[in-house]
């Protein structure tokens, strides 16, 4: 055994090893991507199942309906009367109605500043005390006045009122029920949840006048559609790609799909024939949403606090009416009410590819890890290689025989100062765009971005010129620069993959070209080609491309990003500017670099 | 490289043709290598300094020292289950009854004031003979003695000496035997002519006395022999004359009577089906009708008394006339607050149920000697084995207060039932019965304690992984000492006391809680805990040791060779 | 509420403030007080009180006093005992002050405190153990789980209610235990009823039905046993059993047959017809809190069956607290007595007859507009309590958290002084230095001015819980925030309950308001004016994944093994220069392979041929 060990140690001195890494990296990337595309197959994905037995979804008969329809209509009238009234007036009216039902009502003001805009409003919420409970646990029913798209959530709010009145009649609740109406779908819930957990900045967000116990789950109703609907759409993406417990989604799917006999869709796949292409599309959409880490509804803000939540929105033309929607909510609440423990049984890390198929983290994580690993491998290889005199340097005068006799490149000592300095410099430089884009007012966001994009293209040239001009770095130093930046990249991505798999994978794929960049002192063709390629996968370029693809304007995207950053601490910008961008910068500088030969440098030193 | 090979081969060939194959192999190996003469170029490591070698061996040794001298003992100490060593063999002996043969010497003194000394002696001897002829049971055996003639004035027997019975011989016109109801005295009158002469070898009077005694102690003997036969007593003590039906009735009686306890809680409850009556004179009634018996029982049992009144109590059986099946289910255990009192002592319930229900079908005989173990009935009350008594008292519905006079009959019934519940024999005068009770109880306790010891010993043998705390051990030792004492002083008061202690100790030792703790720890778990630790740590240690030993061997061999070479030169 | 209380004083010589007032004149009282509350709730408080002379008690002669309980008391040397089973929350904002001024209620779950006779603390603990075990058997509650970690010895919060001879004061120990997680249910009510002389068979106890009781919005069962020594006559031992419940009238009027609140048929809906859009299929529901007609049989599902014959004849068994104006229908044979205060009336009941009472809805004139006013004039106005208290957790995460109690003093002119007591489980390690009290609106810490006295008994891991008693005051018409931080400790994995992910219940805080006296001296001796409990909390601890204990073992031992192996090798191995070791390389490997191959070939071929071949 010790001999083998020493053998392995000595193997690394074999030159053939140094030729392997690029191929290894390619292999890693390929396997990673292929792996991802295998996931939707039946062999790799699994059927969903309820692992928390207490939930018993769809086991109870739901009674919402009948004359509650009349009440609903009445409340609908009330809500319609409130359209384009001010937030305060709306809350006044709602408060009077809910007080009439005999519930305690609280209100909360919040004000957020982001990208020069002010997002302020007032949340109104009511607490239905569990008849026999003791304020230790609670579940939340949210209806935002306006949904994410800004449409008025008339039916949602009316349904919430009706359900409040209906739930009051039951005596079986073991947990308090909180009815929350927020003016908008992102800031309002965020403010409320923060205040509920006393994690709020009291300058911007008021504390809550009344509270209940620990939140066990939340359901948001997003019901803007006026006509009868066909099936419901479950939105489950949380902030920063966090996901609710799979059991919650399963129970909603089980109740809506199984009990109520309505269709259930996820990730805006309105039609889904459970085949490979659809599954793949669903999964990719899910990954994209997760990667962006944007809040996708009122439920998103709950998830960071380990409160499992989903938004239910009806869609399609069908024969299901508001009562059916109400029954779905009722059924889900009955299930949550059964919970003895906080949801913990099922998965928190998963990719859904159909409402009843998923892959768990153990299955999908390797692909991202492989992609991240390729950087690390390359970095290590470069480090090792930089320790040897590059073969070109060996004098051509020595004929092959002696070369054979002395195959091993003599070890040379690495001078680390310049590479380290450069890489750290890039990292620090990355703070600039982060700050700029998160604090610039909305109006100047677009121009700012264009300027930055242009500068961004110029920057590598400037830097490399600067480098060659003053430092004349050797090939070894370029190798070290690449090695360090790739090392950092690999490190960041592999750790990020456990938090936000999709983001790590996206960045990993977009930065994968960096692995193979190297200075081309001889062939300008290759150099320009590489430079172009790199500019194509630059963060700015990718941003522009995606904006063009989804017909959004840059300004809106940046505003959203800034808002997310300010309100609910989305960390995707950090990843883009502080992980991706510096690596890109280092890579492109190396591509443009003109390594000075060792001897020439010595000469320069001599003279 | 192919150009070079023949030469090599040649050279090798002429030196050692036999090694061709291996040589070829070697050459191939060398030739294909990047450094053709790599091995030649490699320099060998300088020879190790002996100090280093010694140090290494010391290091390895110290590691092993730590493991062996520190690790193993600690591990052993912390993981072994403490088992106090019990005198298993002796315990089993007790269980098999080999350790003690219960013998009840009953001393019976004869007062024959009317007779002269040697007459009396003679009579006594004859009677003793007669008794020994009659007696067939070694365990239980009567010994006569002549009490010093006392003045006829005081015929009170003095408690302090432990004579079981006093026979008072009084001359009369015919031979009669009467048992004094309030003291253990048997009065026998005899016509003067029946006095045996000093020479006569047999006498009608002697045989008569003997038979009287025998009949007096027949029941006790039966009971004790029954107890013995139920335990694993070797058959040589076994009584022969125990008829099966007698045995059956005895077993009935023993099942009916409560397990022995030094203290009993007596709970007197007044249950009424309606709101009335709501008070009763129970204290007075108890003092009047029950106290005497309790006082007499005092040396054997202590009693604590509490009373309660429960209104609106619905019995378990609603129908008007109760027949035998109803009696057992009459007590409404779910509704009635008859919870056994806290503290170890068992509770005996005496229930006066005020209602208009009556017992139909009065069973045959209707007396305690009836063979119905489920519920022995004496209308209007019945005894529930090992539990207590229910007495149906029918009162005019508007009585609010139950007087002591009304409670007379119930309490008398309770008293008699109490006796049978405590397992007192039913024949003979009261004092006799009580002294008998003491003897029976001590025998019973003795046997139970020893059987408990036996089962404890068997348990300890059966479960090797069971921990045995030291408390159990000294419990056992205490039990055995007291058993020994009890066995020696059997039949006496202190014998009973010792038996009591022994039984209590044995029970405590047997039901020690900490003995079951370790019991169910499967070995797979131990493996799962130890293996991952011992594997990775143990393997390097072992390898190191083996390598060291090998190296040491090698060194020795080299030394030997060098020595040999030295010799050669 | 105040008059409610004084009225109780009057009606049943209540002893909970003036023990001496209670004389052993009659041995058994029972009374039911009904009191409609706002939001269509009904407070029903049952009170049963019976006493036995101490002499009879010592002689084990039990008449009205339950034997089962008496034995326990004697066996555990208990002088005074208070046992509480509570469920739900008292909604102080709308219902006002608590019944009995909070003296007859406990926090959610089970609460038990008792004064025991004992020479030493150990003896007291031992007796406490036997007491809890015996009681748990008697009441089918898991009181036996009140172990040392859940037991505290309050110093300021509780004063004995009974009269104890001063001689024994020295060696009586007060122990207090609480089980917040215990779910009170029917199996606790049945033994409770068994303790009554008339069981549930006669008198007001016939109304007590498990289904109704535990459907209540708030309910509390209390048992208080205390020795009472009247100035004249001998001392008696008094047991008082109280059940207070707040019933939601609409919910409990639902027939037992179908408890499911199916939506009523459209035409039965009470609609607000004033709405413009009102139609057959559109109905804005009329206000929920409009108080409606109810009757005993509707609320409790049955009527009162006569009276318990043992009860004191001059205590009216049923009292109702509504203004004079309301009209009440009662079954004939029973007669009504209005009380002087004009806010209550009592009823004498025929011994055998069934008693039914109907409270019709107030006249519709009051119904039309501003219902709040109408309701207030139809009900006895709830009296505002001395203090509002609300407790909640602050912060989130598994490592540390905080507790915040909001104490509001409603009275405009009267300062409230009280004792705030927390008994926390040991795994909540509180940081005492972080405890602070501040008045809302004012910045800075008024800790010293508000908190007057702190008694703190720190927790010992796995042995005893934290005990914190704070004597503090709240200035008139102001709100005080009392906050402190704590750290959550990690349990051993056998210490987690089966439902570890639910969280761990933290018992309610006990707030005892003292009668304001000039002497700001020690709190002992000052009588209790009002007591209230906060709600209990649910504290979530870091919870491992119990499915894989062996993974942990394997991980740790692997780490150990790595460390050990490295060290061992460094110590034992010999290190030589790289080119001094034996040659190993790909070439070497290949060479060895070829070697084997050559051997194979040679095996097949003849020697010379073999050589030729290799040429």
Image (cartoon, rainbow, N blue to C red):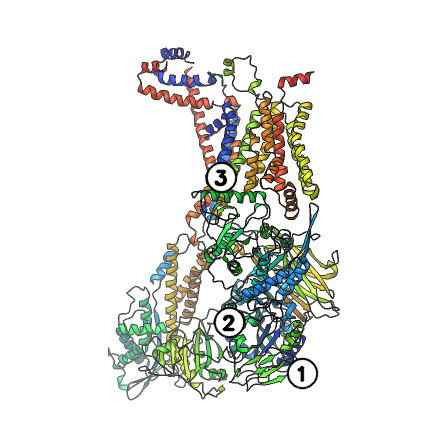
Q: Position of residue A185 (x, y in %)?
A: 61, 52
Residue C89 is situated, as x and y percent measured from the top left of the image, at 60, 66
Give me the chain letter of mark 3: A
**Label 2: how many residues lie within 10 Å, few (<14), some (14-19) or many (20+)?**
some
Residue at 63% x, 37% y: name it. A578
**Mark 3 to mark 2: distance in Å?**
59 Å
Instruction: Say which of A445 and C413 sits in front.
Output: A445
Sequence-earlier tag: 2 or 1:
2
Badge number at residue C340? 1
Label of residue C210 in the image: 2
Secondary structure at badge 1 equals loop
Q: Which residue is mark 3?
A: A36
Identify the mark at residue A526; answer none if there is no mark.
none
Q: CA distance from mark 2 to mark 1?
A: 35 Å
Q: Quadrant of residue B116?
A: bottom left
The C terminus of chain B: image quadrant: top left
Q: Chain of mark 1?
A: C
Q: Secondary structure at mark 3?
A: helix
Does residue C614 lie above or below B365 as drawn? above
In the image, A485 versus A219, the foreground residue is A219
Judged left or right of residue C461, residue B463 is: left
Marks 2, 1 in one chain: yes
Question: Which of the image's four quarters has the N terminus of chain B?
Answer: top left
């Amino acid at each position: 055994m010790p001999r083998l060990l020493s053998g392995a140690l000595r193997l690394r001195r074999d030159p053939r090893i140094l030729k392997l890494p690029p191929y290894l990296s390619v292999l890693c990337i390929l396997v990673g991507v292929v792996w991802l595309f295998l996931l939707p197959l039946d062999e790799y994905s699994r059927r969903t199942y309820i692992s928390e037995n207490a939930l018993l979804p769809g086991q109870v008969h739901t009674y919402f309906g009948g004359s509650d329809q009349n009440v609903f209509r009445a409340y609908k009238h009330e809500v319609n009367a409130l359209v384009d009234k001010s937030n305060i007036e709306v809350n006044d009216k709602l408060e009077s109605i809910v007080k009439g039902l005999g519930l305690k009502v609280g209100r909360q003001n919040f004000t957020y500043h982001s990208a020069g805009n002010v997002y302020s409003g007032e949340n109104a919420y009511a607490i239905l005390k569990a008849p026999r409970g003791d304020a230790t646990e609670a579940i939340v029913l949210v209806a935002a006045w306006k949904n994410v798209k800004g449409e008025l959530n008339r039916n949602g709010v009316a349904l919430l009122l009706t359900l409040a009145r209906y739930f009051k009649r039951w005596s079986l609740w073991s947990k308090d029920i909180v009815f929350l109406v927020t003016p908008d779908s992102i800031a309002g819930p965020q403010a409320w949840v923060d205040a509920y957990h006393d994690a709020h900045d009291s300058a911007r967000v008021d504390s809550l006048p009344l509270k209940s116990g620990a939140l066990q789950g939340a359901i948001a109703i997003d019901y803007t559609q006026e006509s009868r609907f066909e099936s419901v759409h479950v939105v489950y993406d949380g902030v920063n790609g966090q996901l609710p417990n799979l059991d919650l989604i399963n129970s909603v799917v089980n109740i809506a799909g199984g009990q109520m006999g309505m269709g259930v869709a996820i990730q805006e796949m309105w039609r889904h024939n459970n085949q490979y292409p659809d599954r793949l599309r669903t999964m990719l959409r899910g990954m994209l949403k997760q990667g962006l880490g944007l809040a996708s509804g009122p439920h998103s803000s709950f998830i960071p606090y380990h409160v499992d939540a989903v938004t239910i929105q009806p869609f399609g033309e069908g024969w299901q009416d508001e009562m059916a929607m109400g029954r779905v909510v009722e059924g889900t609440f009955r299930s949550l009410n059964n919970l003895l423990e906080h949801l913990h049984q099922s998965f928190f890390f998963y990719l859904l590819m159909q409402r009843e198929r998923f892959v768990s983290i153990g299955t999908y994580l390797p692909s991202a890890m492989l992609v991240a690993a390729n950087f690390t491998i390359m970095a290590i290889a470069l480090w090792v290689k930089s320790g040897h005199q590059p073969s070109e340097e060996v004098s051509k005068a020595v004929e092959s025989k002696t070369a054979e006799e002395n195959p091993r490149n003599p070890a040379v000592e690495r001078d680390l100062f310049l590479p380290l300095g450069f890489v750290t410099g890039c990292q620090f430089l990355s703070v600039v765009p982060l700050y700029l884009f998160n604090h610039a007012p909305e109006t100047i966001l677009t121009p700012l971005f264009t300027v930055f994009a242009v500068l961004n293209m110029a920057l590598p040239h400037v830097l490399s010129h600067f480098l060659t001009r003053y430092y004349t770095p050797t090939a070894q130093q370029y190798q070290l620069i690449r090695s360090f930046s790739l090392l950092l990249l690999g490190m960041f991505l592999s750790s990020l993959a456990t938090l936000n798999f999709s983001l790590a994978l996206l960045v990993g794929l977009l930065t994968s070209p960096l692995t193979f960049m190297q200075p081309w002192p001889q062939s300008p063709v290759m150099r320009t080609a590489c430079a172009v390629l790199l500019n194509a996968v630059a963060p700015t370029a990718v941003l522009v491309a995606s904006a063009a693809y989804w017909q959004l304007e840059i300004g809106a995207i940046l505003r959203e990003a800034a808002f997310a950053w300010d309100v609910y601490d989305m960390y995707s910008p950090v990843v883009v500017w502080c992980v991706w961008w510096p690596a890109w910068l280092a890579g492109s500088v190396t591509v443009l670099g003109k390594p000075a030969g060792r001897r020439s440098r010595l000469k320069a030193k001599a003279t | 490289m192919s150009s070079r090979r023949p030469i090599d081969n040649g050279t090798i060939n002429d030196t050692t043709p036999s090694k061709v194959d291996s040589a070829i192999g070697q050459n191939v190996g060398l030739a294909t290598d990047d450094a053709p003469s790599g091995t030649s170029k490699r320099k060998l490591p300088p020879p190790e300094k002996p100090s280093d070698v010694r140090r290494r061996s010391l290091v390895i040794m110290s590691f092993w020292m730590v493991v062996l001298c520190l690790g193993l003992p600690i591990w052993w100490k912390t993981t072994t289950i403490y088992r106090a060593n019990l005198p298993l063999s002796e315990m089993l002996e007790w269980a098999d009854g080999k350790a003690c043969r219960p013998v009840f010497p009953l001393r019976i003194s004869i007062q024959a004031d009317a007779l002269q000394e040697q007459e009396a002696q003679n009579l006594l001897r004859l009677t003793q003979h007669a008794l020994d002829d009659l007696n067939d049971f070694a365990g239980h055996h009567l010994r006569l003695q002549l009490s010093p003639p006392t003045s006829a004035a005081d015929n009170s027997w003095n408690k302090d000496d432990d004579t079981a019975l006093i026979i008072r011989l009084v001359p009369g016109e015919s031979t009669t035997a009467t048992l004094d109801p309030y003291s253990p005295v048997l009065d026998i009158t005899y016509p003067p002519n029946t006095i045996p002469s000093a020479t006569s070898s047999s006498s009608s009077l002697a045989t008569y006395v003997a038979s009287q005694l025998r009949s007096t102690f027949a029941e006790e003997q039966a009971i004790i022999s029954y107890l013995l036969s139920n335990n694993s007593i070797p058959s040589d003590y076994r009584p022969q004359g125990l008829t099966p039906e007698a045995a059956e009735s005895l077993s009935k009686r023993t099942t009916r009577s409560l397990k022995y306890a030094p203290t009993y809680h007596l709970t007197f409850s007044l249950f009424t089906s309606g709101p009335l009556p709501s008070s009763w004179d129970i204290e007075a009634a108890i003092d009047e009708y029950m106290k005497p018996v309790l006082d007499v029982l005092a040396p054997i049992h202590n009693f604590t008394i509490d009373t309660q009144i429960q209104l609106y109590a619905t019995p378990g059986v609603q129908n008007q006339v109760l027949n035998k099946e109803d009696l057992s289910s009459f007590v409404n255990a779910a509704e009635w607050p008859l919870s056994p009192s806290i503290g170890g002592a068992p509770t005996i319930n005496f229930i006066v149920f005020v209602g208009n229900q009556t017992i139909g079908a009065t069973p045959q005989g209707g007396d305690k000697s009836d063979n119905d173990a489920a519920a022995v009935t004496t209308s209007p009350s019945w005894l529930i084995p090992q539990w207590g008594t229910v007495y149906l008292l029918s009162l005019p519905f508007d009585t609010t207060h139950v007087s002591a006079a009304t409670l007379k009959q119930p309490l008398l019934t309770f008293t008699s039932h109490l006796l049978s519940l405590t397992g007192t024999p039913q024949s003979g005068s009261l004092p006799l019965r009580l002294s008998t009770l003491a003897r029976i109880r001590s025998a019973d306790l003795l046997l139970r304690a020893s059987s408990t010891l036996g089962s404890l010993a068997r348990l300890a043998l059966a479960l090797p992984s069971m921990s045995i705390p030291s408390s159990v051990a000294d419990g056992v030792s205490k039990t055995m000492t007291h058993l020994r004492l009890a066995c020696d002083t059997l039949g006496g008061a202190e014998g009973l006391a010792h038996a009591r202690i022994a039984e209590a100790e044995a029970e405590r030792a047997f039901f020690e809680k900490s003995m079951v703790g370790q019991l169910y720890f499967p070995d797979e778990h131990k493996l799962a805990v130890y293996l991952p630790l011992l594997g990775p740590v143990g393997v390097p240690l072992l390898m190191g040791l083996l390598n060291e030993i090998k190296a040491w061997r090698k060194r020795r061999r080299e030394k030997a060779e060098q020595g040999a070479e030295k010799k050669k030169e | 509420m105040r008059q409610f209380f004084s009225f109780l004083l009057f009606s049943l010589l209540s002893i909970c403030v003036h023990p001496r007032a209670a004389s052993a004149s009659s041995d058994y009282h029972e009374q039911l007080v009904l009191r409609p509350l706002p939001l269509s709730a009904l407070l029903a408080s049952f009170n049963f009180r019976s006493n036995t002379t101490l002499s009879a008690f010592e002689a084990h002669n039990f008449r009205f006093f339950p034997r089962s309980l008496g034995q326990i008391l004697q066996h555990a040397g208990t002088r005074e005992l208070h046992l509480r089973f509570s469920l739900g929350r008292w909604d102080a904002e709308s219902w006002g002050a608590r019944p009995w001024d909070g003296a007859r209620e406990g926090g959610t779950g089970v609460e038990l405190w008792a004064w025991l006779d004992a020479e030493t603390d150990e003896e007291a603990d031992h007796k406490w153990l036997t007491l809890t075990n015996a009681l748990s058997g008697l009441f089918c509650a898991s009181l036996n789980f009140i172990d040392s970690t859940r037991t505290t010895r309050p110093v300021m919060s509780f004063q004995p209610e009974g009269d104890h001879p001063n001689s024994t004061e020295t060696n009586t120990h007060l122990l207090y235990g609480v089980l917040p997680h215990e779910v009170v249910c029917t199996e606790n009510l049945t033994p409770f009823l068994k303790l009554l002389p008339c069981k549930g068979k006669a008198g007001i106890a016939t109304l007590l039905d498990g289904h109704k009781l535990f459907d209540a919005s708030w309910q509390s069962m209390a048992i208080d046993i205390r020795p009472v020594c009247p100035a004249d006559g001998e001392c008696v031992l008094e047991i008082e059993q109280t059940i207070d419940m707040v019933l939601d009238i609409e919910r409990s009027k639902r027939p037992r047959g179908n408890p499911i609140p199916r939506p009523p048929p459209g035409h039965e809906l009470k609609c607000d017809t004033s709405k413009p859009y009102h139609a057959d299929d559109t109905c804005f529901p009329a206000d929920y809190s409009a108080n409606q007609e109810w009757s005993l049989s509707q609320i409790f599902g049955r009527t009162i069956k006569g009276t318990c014959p043992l009860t004191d004849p001059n205590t009216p068994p049923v009292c109702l607290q509504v203004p004079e104006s309301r009209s009440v229908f009662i079954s004939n044979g029973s007669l009504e007595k209005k009380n002087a205060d004009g806010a209550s009336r009592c009823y004498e009941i025929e011994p055998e007859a069934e008693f039914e009472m109907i409270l019709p809805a107030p006249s519709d004139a009051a119904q039309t507009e501003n219902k709040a006013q109408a309701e207030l004039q139809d009900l006895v106005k709830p009296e505002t309590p001395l203090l509002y208290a609300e407790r909640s957790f602050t912060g989130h995460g598994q490592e540390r958290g905080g507790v915040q109690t909001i104490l509001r003093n409603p009275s405009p002119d009267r300062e409230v002084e009280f004792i705030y007591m927390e008994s926390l489980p040991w795994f909540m390690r509180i940081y005492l230095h972080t405890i602070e009290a501040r008045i809302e609106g004012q910045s800075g810490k008024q800790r010293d001015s508000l908190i007057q006295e702190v008694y703190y008994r720190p927790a010992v891991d796995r042995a005893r819980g934290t005990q914190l008693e704070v004597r503090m005051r709240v200035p008139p018409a102001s709100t005080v925030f009392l906050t402190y931080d704590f750290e959550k400790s990690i349990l051993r994995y056998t210490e987690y309950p089966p439902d570890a992910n639910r969280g761990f219940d933290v018992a309610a805080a006990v707030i005892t308001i003292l009668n304001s006296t000039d002497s700001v001296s020690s709190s002992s001796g000052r009588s209790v004016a009002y007591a209230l409990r906060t709600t209990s909390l649910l504290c979530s601890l870091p919870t491992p994944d119990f499915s894989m204990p062996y993974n942990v073992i394997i991980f740790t031992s692997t780490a150990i093994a790595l460390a050990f192996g490295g060290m061992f090798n460094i110590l034992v191995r010999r290190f030589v220069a790289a080119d001094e070791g034996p040659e190993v390389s790909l070439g070497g490997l290949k060479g060895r392979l070829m070697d084997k191959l050559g051997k194979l070939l040679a095996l097949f071929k003849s020697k010379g041929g073999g050589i030729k071949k290799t040429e």
